Image (tube, rainbow, N blue to C red):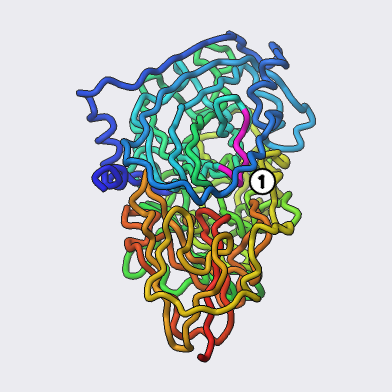
C-alpha cells in the first residue's frame, strides 16, 4: 500500500497535475535521473528532405497494429508489489516526410516549412497486470535539443517490437505533456499543460507561422494513465512525434508564439471526470455541465476561463471518451454568447459512438478568432445517453492562442459579427489498433439467463479476475437473493501490483459475446455501477466493496468489469 500511496500523492490526470507532482519530480535531486538517450539519426531540416522509409517506420498511421488475442487467465494471481516503473527514455530524430499530400486529415497536412519531424519515446514502462493507475514520468522527458518552435505533436504507444498495442489489450487512457518551467494559463497553480491525448490519439497541429516556443531549459513532465485490460504483464513505450522548427532555421524568423489554453469541464480537478447515466439528458444525449445537477457544488465554475489579454484563437480539438459526441467552445462578452467551434467525434466504429475507434475533428487551418481581455471562454461536452452509460467521462478542449497575428495571415474574425463555427477536420483516419470490435458469439461465456439459481453468499469476493459466484467464465449457477435483498462484492485483488481495480457494471443480458473495444457496454435497461473498487485515490472509489441496489425488480442481472471487460458475471433477484 505504501507504494500505491506514493503514486497517489502524485496522482494527476488530464485536467490536473498536482503542484506536488512537479515539485516532487524536480526536487528529486538526490537520485540520479534515469538514463536518457538522445539519438539523432537524421538531420533533415525541411519538408523537402524526405526519407519515406524511415518516416513510415515511425508513422503511427502506417505502423502495424497487433491484435494480441490475449485472453483472461484465471490462474493469474498476485505478484509482489513493486515500485512504480522508472522510465528510461530515448529520442530519435527522423527525417521529414509527407505521407499524404491531400491534407484530408490534420495528420496528413503537409509538414511546415523548416520543420523536422522528431520521434521521441518514454520507456520501457512496465505495465502491471490489469493496471489502470495514474502515474507520471520521473526521469527527464526527451525533447528537442535546441530552442525553437513546436508546430505539431502526434502521440502513440508501442510494444518492444514496434507494433502498436490493440486498444482492446493495452491503451493510453490519457497522457498529458506539461512544461514545469511555465505556469498553466487557465490553472496557474499547475505546470503548463501543452498537449494531451487519450486513445483517440489526436494529432495537434498549429497553423503555418505559429508555434509553441520551446527552450532547452524547459522541464517537461508526462502524466499518464495506461490501462492494461488483461492480467498479463507487458512493457510499452509512449511515443510522440514532434514537428520542430529550430530557432536557427530561417522559417523561425517571423514566427509568432502560441500558448496553450486548457479548457475542461472539470478544469483543475485531480480526476476531471463525470458520469453519463443512460436515460439522462434529453433526446438521448447528455451535455455536461449544462444538464448536470449542481455540477460544481459551492465551488467555482470549472468549465470557463476569463481571457487575460486580447489575442487570436488559432486552433483547437476536443477530448472525449467513448460515447462522446462532441465538445463545444463558446465565447461570452457582455452577456452575449457565441459558438466558436464544435469538435465532433467522428466514429469509424461500425457499432457507432461506443469505442475508441474515433477521431475528433479539429479546427481548419484558416480558423482565426478575435478575443478580448475579459471575454469568457467556456466548453461543454455532449455524450450519447440513449444507448449506454459512460462512467468517468471527460470533456476537454486545448485551445491555442496568440497575442498577435503574423503579417499577411488570414484576418481573424470577430465572432460576434461573423460565424466562425465552421466544420472541422478529422485529426486522423481509422487506426488499425481499433480493429477488434468484439460482439461476436463466444462459446467460452455461459448464458447465465438460463443457468440455475443458488443462494448468494453474503459477500462475493473478486479474486484472480474471477467473481467467486456467478462468474460467466467460471461459474455454473447464479447467486440469487430475494427482492429487497442485496449482495456485497469485495475486490480482493485491489492491492495487487499497481492496483487491480474491478467494477460491477450492468450490461444488457446475456452479455456473453466476445470482448472488444465495442463490447460489452454499460447498456442494461437498469444501470448500476460499483465504481473502481480500490482505495488508492483517483480513479478508485475509495472502497473495495459495493452492494447491489436493494430496489431491483425480479430478474437476472448481468454485469461486466469496465476495467477488464473480459470479466463478466450475473446475479439474480427472485422470490424464493
Ligand atoms: Cu476487473
Along the viewing direction, whichever of 219 and 494 lies nearer the viewer: 494
Give coordinates of residue 389: x percent, y percent.
Answer: 57, 67
Give coordinates of residue 525: x percent, y percent.
Answer: 61, 77
Q: Secondary structure at mark 1?
A: strand
In the picture shown, does residue 24 fall above or below 497?
above
Give coordinates of residue 79: x percent, y percent.
Answer: 37, 42
Along the viewing direction, whichever of 76 and 14 lies nearer the viewer: 76
Q: Does 220 sit left or right of 67 as displayed?
A: left
- Residue at the (39%, 29%) spot, across then down: 220
- Residue at the (58%, 55%) spot, across then down: 566
Q: Residue furthest right?
A: 102
Q: Residue furthest bottom?
A: 575
- Asked whether 521 falls inside the magenta stretch, the response is no
Q: Main secondary structure of the magenta part?
A: loop
Residue 191 in view (yes/no) = yes
In the picture shown, does residue 115 fall above or below 454?
above
Along the viewing direction, whichever of 431 and 231 lies nearer the viewer: 231
Q: Which span is picked out in magenta?
A: 163-169
- Residue at the (63%, 39%) spot, across then down: 68
**Total number of numbered discs in the rendering:** 1
Along the viewing direction, whichever of 113 and 85 lies nearer the viewer: 85
Q: Which quarter of the figure has residue 442? A: bottom right
Q: Which quarter of the figure has residue 3? A: top left
- Residue at the (55%, 34%) spot, across then down: 157
Q: Which residue is mark 1?
A: 359
Q: Residue furthest left?
A: 30
- Determine if the C-beta at disc 1 is less than 8 A from ligand 1: no
Other-residue count near label 1 (Cα within 10 Å), few / some / many at <14 / 14–19 / ≥20? many
Give coordinates of residue 58: x percent, y percent.
Answer: 63, 23
Residue 188 in view (yes/no) = no
Amino acid at each position: 500500500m505504501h507504494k500505491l500511496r506514493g503514486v497517489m500523492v502524485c496522482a494527476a490526470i488530464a485536467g490536473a497535475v498536482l503542484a506536488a507532482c512537479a515539485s516532487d519530480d524536480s526536487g528529486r535531486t538526490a537520485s540520479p535521473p534515469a538514463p536518457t538517450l538522445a539519438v539523432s539519426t537524421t538531420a533533415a531540416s525541411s519538408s523537402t528532405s524526405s526519407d519515406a522509409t524511415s518516416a513510415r517506420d515511425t508513422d503511427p498511421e502506417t505502423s502495424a497494429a497487433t491484435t494480441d488475442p490475449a485472453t483472461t487467465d484465471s490462474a493469474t494471481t498476485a505478484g509482489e508489489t513493486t515500485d512504480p516503473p522508472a522510465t528510461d527514455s530515448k529520442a530519435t530524430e527522423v527525417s521529414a516526410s509527407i505521407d499524404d499530400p491531400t491534407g484530408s486529415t490534420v495528420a496528413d497536412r503537409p509538414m511546415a516549412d523548416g520543420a523536422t519531424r522528431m520521434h521521441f519515446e518514454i520507456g520501457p514502462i512496465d505495465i502491471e497486470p490489469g493496471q489502470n493507475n495514474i502515474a507520471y514520468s520521473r526521469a527527464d522527458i526527451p525533447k528537442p535539443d535546441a530552442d525553437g518552435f513546436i508546430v505539431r505533436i502526434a502521440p502513440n504507444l508501442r510494444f518492444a517490437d514496434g507494433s502498436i498495442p490493440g486498444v482492446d489489450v493495452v491503451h493510453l487512457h490519457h497522457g498529458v505533456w506539461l512544461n514545469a518551467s511555465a505556469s498553466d494559463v487557465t490553472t496557474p497553480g499547475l505546470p503548463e499543460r501543452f498537449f494531451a491525448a487519450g486513445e483517440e490519439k489526436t494529432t495537434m497541429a498549429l497553423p503555418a507561422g505559429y508555434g509553441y516556443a520551446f527552450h532547452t531549459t524547459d522541464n517537461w513532465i508526462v502524466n499518464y494513465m495506461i490501462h492494461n485490460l488483461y492480467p498479463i504483464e507487458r512493457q510499452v513505450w509512449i511515443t510522440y512525434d514532434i514537428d520542430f522548427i529550430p530557432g536557427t532555421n530561417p522559417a523561425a524568423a517571423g514566427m509568432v508564439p502560441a500558448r496553450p489554453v486548457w479548457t475542461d469541464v472539470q478544469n483543475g480537478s485531480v480526476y476531471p471526470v463525470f458520469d453519463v447515466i443512460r436515460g439522462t439528458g434529453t433526446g438521448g444525449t447528455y451535455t455536461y455541465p449544462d444538464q448536470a445537477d449542481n455540477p460544481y457544488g459551492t465551488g467555482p465554475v470549472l468549465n470557463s476561463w476569463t481571457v487575460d489579454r486580447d489575442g487570436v484563437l488559432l486552433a483547437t480539438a476536443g477530448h472525449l471518451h467513448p460515447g462522446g459526441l462532441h465538445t463545444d467552445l463558446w465565447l461570452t462578452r457582455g452577456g452575449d454568447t457565441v459558438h466558436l467551434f464544435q469538435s465532433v467525434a467522428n466514429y469509424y466504429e461500425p457499432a457507432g459512438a461506443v469505442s475508441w475507434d474515433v477521431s475528433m475533428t479539429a479546427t481548419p487551418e484558416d480558423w482565426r478568432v478575435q478575443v478580448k481581455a475579459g471575454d469568457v471562454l467556456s466548453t461543454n461536452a455532449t455524450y450519447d445517453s440513449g444507448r449506454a452509460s459512460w462512467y468517468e467521462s471527460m470533456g476537454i478542449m486545448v485551445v491555442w492562442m496568440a497575442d498577435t497575428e503574423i503579417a499577411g495571415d488570414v484576418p481573424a474574425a470577430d465572432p460576434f459579427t461573423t460565424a466562425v463555427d465552421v466544420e472541422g477536420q478529422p485529426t486522423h483516419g481509422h487506426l488499425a489498433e481499433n480493429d477488434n470490435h468484439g460482439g461476436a458469439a463466444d462459446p467460452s461465456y455461459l448464458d447465465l439467463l438460463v443457468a440455475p439459481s443458488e443462494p448468494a453468499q453474503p459477500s462475493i469476493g473478486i479474486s484472480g479476475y474471477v467473481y467467486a459466484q456467478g462468474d460467466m467464465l467460471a461459474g455454473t449457477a447464479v447467486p440469487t437473493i430475494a427482492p429487497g435483498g442485496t449482495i456485497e462484492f469485495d475486490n480482493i485483488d485491489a492491492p495487487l501490483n499497481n492496483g487491480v481495480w474491478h467494477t460491477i457494471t450492468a450490461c444488457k443480458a446475456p452479455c456473453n459475446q466476445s470482448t472488444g473495444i465495442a463490447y460489452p457496454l454499460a447498456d442494461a435497461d437498469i444501470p448500476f455501477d460499483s465504481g473502481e473498487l480500490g482505495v488508492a485515490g483517483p480513479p478508485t472509489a475509495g472502497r473495495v466493496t459495493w452492494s447491489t441496489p436493494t430496489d431491483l425488480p425480479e430478474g437476472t442481472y448481468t454485469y461486466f468489469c469496465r476495467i477488464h471487460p473480459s470479466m463478466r458475471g450475473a446475479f439474480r433477484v427472485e422470490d424464493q
